Image (cartoon, grey):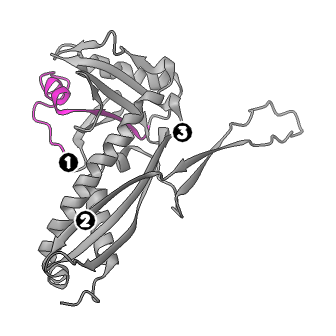
Amino acid sequence: MAITSFIPSVWEGKLLANFHKASVADLVTTSPTRVEGNKVVFNRIGASTLKDYSGSITWDDVSTTPIELNLDQKKYFAIKVDDVDAVQAAGDVLDTVTEDEAMAAKEVMDSYVLGLYTDVHADNTIGDDTTPIALDKTNVYDYIVDLGTKLSKKKVPNSNRFVVINADVLGLLSKDDRFTSNPNVLENGVVEGQKINGMQVVVSEEIANVSGKLKIMALHKSAVGFAKQIEKTEAIRLETSFSDGVRGLFVYGAEVLRPEAMAVLTATVS
């Protein structure tokens, strides 16, 4: 069986498409315009000064702060198939294989991005690991409102705000009359039609839970930069079995760009 007809772009396209439609990390972060190599630079632009006009204009120099994002995280997949050509030809088989690999990558990358809660601005926290907030159906909605208030006090834009919770918290919210009693969670974690204090509610089981201390993360899309790519996808004939191998390498990275555009609640769930 020859593997000369293996088409990397078919596999890469399927993997990225499946990743995008399910990725919380893609939804709540800022992506670079283009990824080249293993480093991306975001430029944070400083604000100019608004002045009174009295007939003349003074020009300000705009300062930029470059923030480097290194794609230093690497994960690979390696699978055996009896016939690469047959897998490519059978779209349903290819979809199943790539969806499984994309979902595995999605879980790892979402966990990595949501783990950046540790870089939150010191003023934007509610509770901590020593004194977590005990959440129940009577107070969970109000505490999430408070996270949005933290963002507003830091003058974070009202659009593109998200709050990431897990299924336990969603269950508590569902018992509050201000929230829907029958939430519909889309494939990318978005709870359809549900916002709290202007923040789109997103559900992910990859949100940090450290020794029973759950993190609820509110953030603006500009708070975190995230980039990923599939660096290599290739097929080889395996020496130890009558099969072909398909392997691929994901590289990715994330960096907090605006700590003040993020707020974190540390809690336990009754």
Which residue is nearer to you in this view: 127 or 171? 127
Magenta-drawn stretch contains 38: no
- The front one of 94 and 161 is 94
From the viewer's perspective, is 263 left or right of 155? left
Indicate whether 114 appears above or below 209.
below
Q: CA distance from mark 3 to mark 2?
A: 33 Å
Q: Which mark is residue 92?
A: none
Residue name at image x 28 percent, y 17 percent? 142
Dot 3 surroundings within 10 Å: few (below 14), some, or many (20 or more)? many
- The part of the chain drawn in magenta is 159-185
Instruction: Identify the mark nearer the N-term, 2 or 1.
Output: 2
Separation of residues labelled 2 and 1 (CA atoms): 29 Å
Q: Taking 93 as reference, is 64 left or right?
A: right
Residue 45 placement (x, y as % from top left): 66, 42
Quadrant in the picture for the N terminus = bottom left
Indicate the quadrant containing the C terminus: top left, top right, bottom left or bottom right.
top left
Please tell me which residue is depicted at 15% across the width and 74% down the height of the picture. 81
Dot 1 crowding, Cα within 10 Å, few <14, some 14–19, many 20+: few
User: Amino acid type of disc 1?
Assistant: Leu
Which residue lies most toward the right here? 56
The mark closer to the camera, 3 or 2, is: 2
* Front residue of this view, candidates 265 and 191: 265
**Residue 169 quadrant:** top left
Question: Which of the two discs, 2 and 1, sits closer to the camera?
Answer: 2
Residue at 28 percent across and 73 percent down: it is 11
Q: Which residue is mark 3?
A: 257
Q: Which residue is mark 2?
A: 78
Could you say whether the residue bearing mark 2 is in a helix, strand or loop? strand
| x, y percent for residue 182 | 10, 35
Q: Gap in Å between the C-alphas at discs 1 and 3?
A: 27 Å
Query: Of the residues under marks 1 and 3, which one precedes in the sequence?
Result: 1
Checking the image for residue 186, the label placed there is 1
